[in-house]
């Protein structure tokens, strides 16, 4: 069994359905004891062949890629950055290009 956590995200990988059911039961008990709730749109329990998102990336059998939502959020930030940068004086440094270059370095 494999477990990893990042902030409020939890990933449990199990080699068998039986072990996964046991892990889900334990995770649910801990969540309940802490009076937390699982987000219905962000909870996935199933075979990894279907693929899943975990902290900004999309995992699938074929490999790893940046999650669609991550790209969408980035593009929204670029658009808002472009708008605010266009209002600055012409002598201000071009921060938008620097931010895009930095972000692409993470991919």
Image (tube, grey):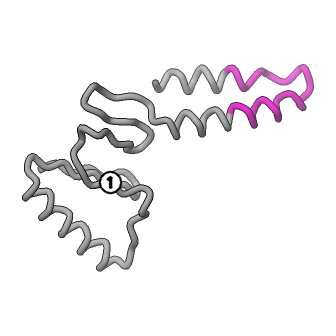
Position above or below: 64 against 48: above
Q: Quadrant of residue 21?
A: bottom left
Range of residues picked out in magenta:
78-97
In the depicted view, which residue is nearer to us: 33 or 18?
18
x then y, percent, for residue 70: 52, 38
10 Å neighbourhood of mark 1: few (<14), some, or many (≥20)? few
Residue at the limit of the structure toward the front, as seen here: 50
Residue at x 69%, y 31% (from the top left corner): 78
Assess whether residue 87 is covered by the magenta stretch. Answer: yes
Residue at x 89%, y 20% (from the top left corner): 91
Q: Main secondary structure of the magenta part?
A: helix
Position above or below: 9 against 93: below
Identify the secondary structure beneath mark 1. Answer: loop
The mark tally for this picture is 1
x then y, percent, for residue 54: 37, 44
In the depicted view, which residue is nearer to us: 98 or 70?
70
Q: Quadrant of residue 75?
A: top right
Q: Quadrant of residue 61?
A: top left
x then y, percent, for residue 47: 21, 45
Position above or below: 33 against 80: below
Position above or below: 57 against 22: above
In the depicted view, which residue is nearer to us: 98 or 80?
80
| Left or right relative to 79: residue 18 | left
Residue at x 31%, y 52% (from the top left corner): 5
| Left or right relative to 32: residue 105 | right
Residue at x 24%, y 51% (from the top left corner): 46
Q: Which residue is mark 1?
A: 44
């Amino acid at each position: 069994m494999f477990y990893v956590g990042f902030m409020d995200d939890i990933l449990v990988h199990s080699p068998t359905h039986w072990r996964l059911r046991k892990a889900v039961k334990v995770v649910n008990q801990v969540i309940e004891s802490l009076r937390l709730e699982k987000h219905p749109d962000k909870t996935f329990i199933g075979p990894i062949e279907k693929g899943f998102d975990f902290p900004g990336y999309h995992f699938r059998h074929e490999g790893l890629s940046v999650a669609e939502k991550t790209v969408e959020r980035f593009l929204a930030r670029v658009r808002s950055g472009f708008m605010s940068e266009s209002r600055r004086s012409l002598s201000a440094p071009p921060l938008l290009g620097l931010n895009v270059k930095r972000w692409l370095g993470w991919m």
